[in-house]
Image (cartoon, rainbow, N blue to C red):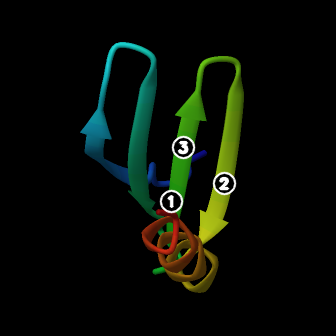
Amino acid sequence: MDKAPEPKTKTLAETDSYIAWLAEEPDGETTYHLELNNVTLHFFAEEWQEFLELIRGIK
């Protein structure tokens, strides 16, 4: 039996404690992930764009 294709991943940014990365899923969807110590947040593309708008609004 064939294995399911794996998503292609790319690191967007990384520090000692945090990492932001994306996954290009086999179905064509791109998902974004933030690993913040022991918490991981997962976003679909439209959610990621809204999150970036939120972060840009922080002063």
Within 10 Å of disc 1 (Cα), the crowding (few <14, some 14-19, many 20+) is many
- Earlier-in-chain disc, 2 versus 1: 1
- What is the CA distance from the residue labelled 3 to the residue labelled 1? 7 Å
- What is the CA distance from the residue labelled 2 to the residue labelled 3? 7 Å
Which one is in front, 5 or 13?
13
Which residue lies most toward the front here?
59
Instruction: Please tell me which residue is depicted at 70% across the width and 18% down the height of the picture.
Output: 38
- Earlier-in-chain disc, 2 versus 3: 3
Residue 3 x %, y %:
54, 45
Which one is in front, 7 or 48?
48
Depth check, mark 3 against mark 1: the one in front is 3
Residue 42's label in the rendered image is: 2
Q: Is residue 21 left or right of residue 51?
A: left
Q: Amino acid at mark 2?
A: His
Q: Which residue is mark 3?
A: 34
Residue 54 x %, y %:
57, 73
Give yes or no for contact between labels 3 and 1 (Cβ–Cβ under 8 Å).
Answer: yes
